[in-house]
Amino acid sequence: MPVEALFTISEPGQARTKEICKGRAVGIDLGTTNSLVAVVQAGQPRCLAADGSALLSSVVHYAADGGIVVGAKARELAATSPQDTIASVKRFMGRGPSDAEATRRLTTYRFAPGEAVDPMVRFAVAGGTRAVTPMEVSAEILRVLKVRAEAELGGELDGVVITVPAYFDDGQRQATRDAGRLAGLEVMRLLNEPTAAALAYGLDKQVQGTFAVFDLGGGTFDISILKLEGGVFEVKSTGGDSALGGDDFDRAVAGHLLRVMGLPEDAGRNAGLARAVLNAAREAKEALTVATESSVTVAMPEGEPWQGSLSRSDLDELVHPVLDRCAPPVRRAMRDAGIETAQLSGVILVGGATRMPLVRSFVAKLFGQEPLADIDPDEVVALGAAIQADLLASGGRSDVVLMDVVPLSLGLEMMGGVSEKLIHRNTTVPCGAVQTFTTYADNQTGFDLHVVQGEREMVADCRSLARFNLGGIPPMTAGMARLKVTFTVDADGILSVSAREEYTGKEASIRVKPSYGLTDDEVERMIRDSFDHADDDMGARLLTVERVEADRILGATRAALSASPSLLVAGEGEAIEAAMASLELAKSATNHLAIRAAIQSLDEVSKEFARRRMNAALDDNMRGQSLDTVEKKVTAK
Amino acid sequence: MICWSCQKAAGEDVFCVGCGAVQPPDGTADYFQVLGVVRSFAIDPVALERRYKELTKMLHPDRFARSDARARRASLERSVQLNEAWRCLKDPIRRAEYLLSLHGVDVGDRGGAGNQDKSGEHATLPVPQVLLMEVLELREALAAAHAARDVHETEALIAKVRGRLNTVMDDVARGFASPQPVLGTIAARLVTVRYYRRFLDEARLLWEQDGAPPAGDLGHAG
């Protein structure tokens, strides 16, 4: 919002602190299979339920008529219209079409053809009339949780903490943040899921020691080693597999069922059948958590349902090869943390899949001790996120701090397609690195840089994060220009880059082309798109949003007018007053688009005034402040 | 330095003496100054960690999530610097290399112990023939163990080299503790350490690959 930015920055010295109503900052676990929202009230975190359940199925159905259904109803619709119903969307977050290829075999979606170099997956939904990105799908889930929380807490949310797998790379984190923005949420922090789980355990029980968090969810596996001491939660190391989870168990069982049913291997290509078999597989798996034998019913898309049975030992046999894939990441994380299993104070279980008896015995064997499961493994992450949201919103409780690490090494592409590591895996965030470049040709004015994430040596084997063009270098003899580039990873694990030419002191301009994140324009367009598909409920919400926005801008403009009347030019004050009056009028009506338009008109007529105020403020307050004050040294492993 | 918030002298500390606003870090401070400990090789690791965590609690960006943009930026930069200092000083090998680099002696890998800009000004330290032969033999033994998928032999090699490395590091500690440390001698020891460390990194990687045993054995059993 340009208006807000200009006016806010023109109030120097005043903290931009928003008044926080206690208890309206929530934690959200945006899960592969289920999503939850939790809040801290009277010092206790609790999950917010709707229709008797805290779990919201992470499934979104796009009807051909433009309607959108989220949750258990959408899951039911999956059987009849699998292509218009997106489940496990988390697997596609921040992923390009080529990444999705691997997961495509038993999935049932239509992927919309992207523009020439579209880095994002798009699902063709609503009978093929609409293409949505994973961020938009996730935003629908977040909106439902937002409404649920606002209804329960009686007002607009002030901020949220959204959890992500520790293993998520920058692109996936950006995508999660973007989903939050699309849903109209203020994302205060992305929090690693295992850290959230430990927070739920640690704060409740004042535990000290080193813990392993074993998180096996629907679609991701995370292993983290955390040290809890004196209120400091330090992630020592993290690892995992972002494409391994309970869904894979379902797939293994489904494959088995197809064989038992005497159907050919490629029967899974039939979308309706695949979905029915997967459902039956999941039901049997869940039943076998308690029972040792379960009947299996596959609702065939055509004809009579298929009847069969599955025993727990059948299940164990099918699941074990998948489960074994958890062992190498565990071993690596233990080594990175420099500890041995005997030194662990405990193992925390997270994720619905850890309810399975086989998983529990696997974990007990792997770590040589019985895991902790006092807190519901489905809720523990959301509860921890709520605790963190509460801490952030109350601003500055200094007795608890969460220290996360970079999940994957960050590197720069060098000559010959080699990745040179700038920041190593498991470095505590925030962290940074500095790299100095010199020009290799006379009068060279720019560099192309390519940042990648991953442990492999060759860039081609790593994930592309972003391509930067460092431009605006003053023309000099080759080797004279020295460009100091600073990479900073913030507490959310998101990368930013700044550069400076040392000889002239000129700040080089950086154009960031995120490979997976969204540009502001795209976010705006998506928000507009989602408005176009909005139902009445949405229209009402929009109206509220625009009215709040109008009030904020009117207030800021009034304050600015009375603070700096001397900066107005002839006639400008009158024009601004007139635009303000129009906005007041629009605000009293019920058309949110009219309010938006009036806001934009006010923005237009007050833009120059705001710019003068900002310049004056910058002159007064920011003189002599260098952007580049940190000297960093790259420390090799 | 002038405080960005109250426009008065901020003092030398993390927070402005006048208004308490968090100040951007001093780019010229060394890692010991950042952590507020005496510049020395002999550091009490427990005290260092306590100090690091105290500072982290004060400076972490989460504490400034709702503050002015400049406070957020200062806390981010402070935390980056602090984490870097901690990462270096908590590890005795990195700490030794860093101490030498502060005296203009660079023994690190490319871009290693510290100051890349200075690396060109120093001749590469000579690597003794004996050391090269030793490491060569160790590598051959490791390759043989890997080829035979002999996890126990790999573990034995790791233990052997770790022992040698510890002996050399004891030497380094003694060198720094002497009233007049001979930096050249310490640097030569650290070159040896570097070779051992590389060997260990490689050996652990192979051990991980070969040692992917059935669940239940993390390789540390017993």
Image (cartoon, coloured by chain):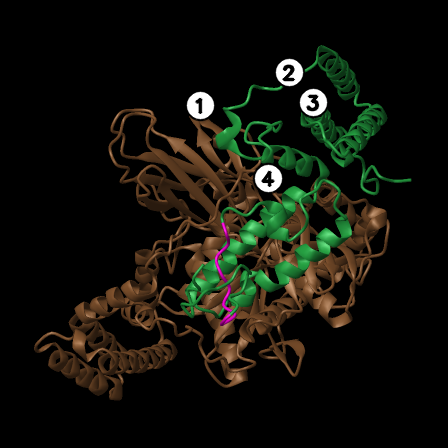
Chain colours: A brown, B green
Residue holding disc 4: A265
Which amino acid lies under the numbered mark 2 shown in the image of this protein? Pro
Residue holding disc 1: A416
- Asked if labels 3 and 4 share a chain, the reply is no
**Which numbered marker is on residue B188?**
3
Which residue does the image show at 65% across and 83% down from the upper left?
A: A42
Q: Above or below — where is A380 with respect to A422? A: below
Q: Chain of mark 2?
A: B
Between the C-alphas of marks 2 and 3, the distance is 8 Å
Which residue does the image show at 65% across and 50% down from the upper left?
A: A221
Crowding at dot 4, Cα within 10 Å, few <14 / some 14-19 / many 20+, comes out as few
Which is more N-terminal, label 4 or label 1?
4
Question: Residue B66's x, y, as percent?
Answer: 48, 70
Q: Nearer the viewer, residue A381 or B73?
A: B73
Crowding at dot 3, Cα within 10 Å, few <14 / some 14-19 / many 20+, comes out as some
Q: Above or below — where is A207 with respect to B141? A: below
Q: Is residue A560 left or right of residue A149?
A: left
Residue holding disc 2: B126
Viewer-side label of 3, 4: 3
**Which numbered marker is on residue A594?**
none
Which element type, helix, strand or loop, lies under badge 4?
Answer: helix
Which amino acid lies under the numbered mark 3 shown in the image of this protein? Ala
Q: Magenta residues, as a range?
A: B18-26
- Asked if labels 1 and 3 share a chain, the reply is no
